[in-house]
Amino acid sequence: MQSALPCETLLGDSPAAKSLRDQVAAASATDCPVLIEGERGTGRELVARVLHSRSARSRARFVRIDSEFFERARLEEKLRRAEGGTLLVKEVAHLRPDPQRHMVSLLQVPQRGGGPNVRVLASTGVDLARAVDAGLLDAEIYHRLGALRIWVPPLRSRPEDIPPLAEHFLRETRSELGCQPLRIAPRAMDKMMLYSWPGNVAELRDVVRRLGMRARPPIIELGDVEAVLPPVQERVPLEQMSFEDMVRSKLRAFLQRMEGYPIKDLYDEVIGRVEKPLIEEVLQRTGGNQVRAAEMLGLNRNTLRKKIALRDVDLGRQGGRRR
């Protein structure tokens, strides 16, 4: 039997972090399917693991399956391993049509009986309601998962949690790499708290690891943080740069930050980050008229609807820019 992970494993003293721990504690007392929502890097899988370890199923296994591998043979193997325990389906919105039918059957098991004895958790980085509206996801999956939902907040919405998280990751790095004791100088921590952390907690962990490897004990200075985080401003004023120059500069800064780490799916990652704000700005210009927006983008209407769902486009921008 594995030892139960305490809810305090989900670090942070902010109201958002405390609310998250309360939600996990409440969900762990039930055996219902749970939908875990949040941006990439927020720690959705950790939430699922804490939920499993605190549940009545903690004596059995926690097993995960990625949506791209969710086909009958692989699913049956995963279900055998997870018997009596918990199955996490990652990025459920990206399931293909045939696997979606398997997912519906799996979610029907508690009512129908006679199926695998497994609790189903699912994670998503996009709004499932939009995926249903766009015809990308079976509505029954959404309705069965939507009864119990946990939202994992992005790190930028809880900057007060950055210091305890950073200190935790620093201790983790020291233990893993055998580094000398380090502490983070106040000015260096202030710099980290001002950064927006688009990669969320996962990015913070990677940055702290890099700081642990490059800083001179006993202290991580402001200069160390500035060397690892993206520059606050470019050398050339933005108004003097062409669009291509701005994109190239941002890509250069992004790749610089990733130096020393394995990079995969770079094309999809970059295209996704460009496509979402582009669609949002075009929709804002057309006042939310998706037909006109599709024409401006050179897309057909159905393709635009799918991209709005998959990129979790903020339709609230259509009436004007949000401050």
Image (spheres, grey):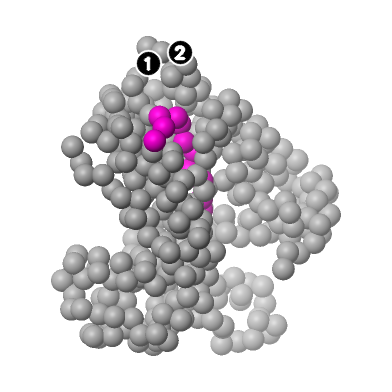
The quarter of the picture where residue 285 lies is bottom right
Label 2 element class: helix
Residue 309 in sight from this viewpoint: yes
Residue 291 horizontal side relative to residue 165, left or right:
right
Q: Quadrant of the C terminus?
A: bottom right
Q: Quadrant of the N terminus?
A: top left
Residue 139 horizontal side relative to residue 231, left or right:
right
Answer whether residue 193 is magenta in the image.
Answer: no
Question: Dot 2: within a 10 Å radius of its alpha carbon, few (fewer than 14), some, or many (20 or more) residues?
Answer: few
The front one of 180 and 25 is 25
Tell me residue 33's x, y (percent): 45, 31
Tell me residue 167's x, y (percent): 32, 71
Residue 253 in sight from this viewpoint: no
User: At 57% from the left edge and 54% from the top edge, which residue is drawn?
Assistant: 272
Mark carried by residue 270: none
Label 1 element class: loop
Where does label 2 land, which residue? Answer: 112
Where does label 1 land, which residue? Answer: 115
Q: Estimate the spatial distance between the alpha carbons at disc 2 and disc 1, rounded to whole Å.
A: 8 Å
Residue furthest to the left in view is 178
Answer whether residue 31 is magenta in the image.
Answer: yes
User: At 25% from the left edge and 32% from the top edge, which residue is drawn?
Assistant: 60
Callout 1, which amino acid?
Gly
Q: What secondary structure predominates along the stretch shown in magenta?
A: loop
Residue interval drawn in magenta: 29-39
Callout 2, which amino acid?
Arg
Q: Is residue 45 above or below residue 281?
A: above
Tell me residue 263's x, y (percent): 38, 60
User: At 45% from the left edge and 56% from the top edge, which residue is drawn?
Assistant: 18
The quarter of the picture where residue 127 lies is top right
Tell me residue 124's x, y (percent): 50, 43
Q: Label 1 near label 2: C-beta < 8 Å?
A: yes
